[in-house]
Image: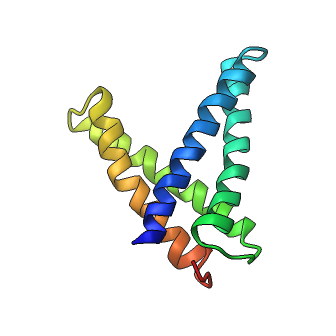
Amino acid sequence: MFQYLRFLFGGGINTLVSVVSFYFINQHFSESVSLAGSFWITFFVSYLINSRFVFRTEEAAKVKFLLAVCIAFVVQQLIGKLVLILGGRDMLVFVIVSLIHVPFFFIMCRHWVFKNSDG
């Protein structure tokens, strides 16, 4: 339970890093460059948070983590499209996607990426 709470707290920090990095990059570059730059900064910070704070492992799981991020992104997009097809709009889409995506990503990290952690 505490590991999941650390995961949610780390996710909040990571979201803040994402928003701030996008804002600053977007001051000098296009939106698409800002999104890409923000994604990679957030990916790096997310790896550090999840490997050191949430799952507390020194295991070099960078490739697995990148794959987990990509899989979670595809799942997130598919769920979002499904919710839209079923009539969801605005924040409802975000809420439903988050309620599925966050535990899904946690489970992938816990049982695949960082499965040998002591966190």
Please name whichever residue, 68 or 7, is drawn nearer the observer in this view of the structure. 7
Q: Name the outermost residue toward the front.
A: 2
Q: Residue at x 42, y 55 (%)?
A: 102
Residue 16: name its quadrant.
top right
Residue 95: name its quadrant.
top left
- Direction from residue 114 to residue 98 in the image, left or right: left
Question: Where in the figure is residue 93, as x and y percent of width and height?
Answer: 31, 36
Image position of 107 with respect to 76: above or below? below
- Direction from residue 80 to residue 70 in the image, left or right: right
Q: Residue at x 77, y 17 (%)?
A: 29
Q: Name the outermost residue toward the left.
A: 87
Question: Where in the figure is residue 33, as x and y percent of width and height?
Answer: 73, 26
Please name whichever residue, 98 or 24, is drawn nearer the observer in this view of the structure. 24
Please name whichever residue, 19 or 3, is drawn nearer the observer in this view of the structure. 3
Image position of 64 with respect to 91: above or below? below
Q: Residue at x 65, y 58 (%)?
A: 49
Residue 63: name its quadrant.
bottom right
Q: Residue at x 59, y 46 (%)?
A: 14
Question: Where in the figure is residue 73, as x and y percent of width and height?
Answer: 52, 50
Please name whichever residue, 83 or 37, is drawn nearer the observer in this view of the structure. 37
Number of disc labels:
0
Question: Where in the figure is residue 89, as x and y percent of width and height?
Answer: 27, 28
- Direction from residue 27 to residue 12 in the image, left or right: left
Image position of 5 with respect to 83: above or below? below
Quadrant location, the C terminus: bottom right
